[in-house]
Image (cartoon, rainbow, N blue to C red):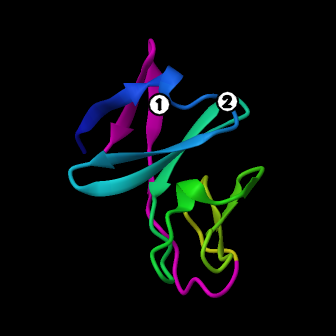
C-alpha cells in the first residue's frame, strides 16, 4: 500500500493526539510513550471523534458515549461500539510522520 507524509512529529506532542485528514478520511494519530498509533477517527457507534476522547494508556474512550477502543489495533473494547475501527501503520522518518494508506 502507498505511504505518505502526513505531518511532523512536532504536530503531536508526547501524550497527545491529533486529527489528520488523509484522502478525505479522518485519522486520529496518538503519541504514547514515544510510540505512534493511527486509527480511523470516528467511533463505530455514533461517529464521535476519537482523538478528542480521554485516553488511559493505549485505550481511548469516545467522547460521546464512552465506547472504548485499543489504539494499537482499533479493536472495540466496550459497548456501545458495535465494531472495531481501522488501525493504520504509522512511523517516523527523520521528523516526518509517515502513514500507510
| Image depth: mark 1 or mark 2 in front | 2
The mark nearer the N terminus, 1 or 2, is 2
Q: CA distance from mark 1 to mark 2?
A: 15 Å
At 55% from the left and 61% from the top, the residue drawn is 50
Tell me the SS state at disc 1: strand
Q: From the top left corner, tell me how far across and down residue 51 is, in percent.
A: 55, 54
Q: Which mark is residue 91?
A: 1
At 22% from the left and 55% from the top, the residue drawn is 24
The residue tagged 2 is: 14
Examine the rendered structure and indicate whether residue 97 appears above or below residue 24. Answer: above
Q: Is residue 101 left or right of residue 61?
A: left
Magenta highlight range: 78-101
On-image quarter of the N terminus: top left
Q: From the top left corner, tell me how far across and down residue 66 is, in percent.
A: 68, 76
Is 8 a magenta residue?
no
Q: Is residue 10 left or right of residue 55?
A: left
Q: From the top left corner, tell me how far across and down residue 77 is, in percent.
A: 69, 75
Q: Nearer the viewer, residue 66 or 94?
A: 66
Image quarter for residue 81? Answer: bottom right
Q: How many marks?
A: 2
Question: Looking at the image, can residue 7 be seen?
Answer: yes
Examine the rendered structure and indicate whether residue 45 appears above or below residue 70. Answer: below
Amino acid at each position: 500500500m502507498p505511504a505518505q507524509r502526513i505531518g511532523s512529529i512536532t504536530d503531536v506532542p508526547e501524550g497527545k493526539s491529533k486529527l489528520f485528514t488523509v484522502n478525505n478520511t479522518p485519522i486520529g494519530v496518538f503519541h504514547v510513550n514515544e510510540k505512534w498509533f493511527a486509527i480511523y477517527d470516528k467511533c463505530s457507534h455514533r461517529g464521535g471523534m476519537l482523538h478528542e476522547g480521554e485516553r488511559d494508556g493505549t485505550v481511548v474512550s469516545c467522547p460521546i458515549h464512552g465506547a472504548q477502543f485499543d489504539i494499537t489495533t482499533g479493536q472495540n473494547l466496550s459497548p456501545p461500539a458495535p465494531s472495531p475501527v481501522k488501525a493504520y501503520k504509522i512511523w517516523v522518518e527523520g521528523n516526518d510522520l509517515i502513514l500507510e494508506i
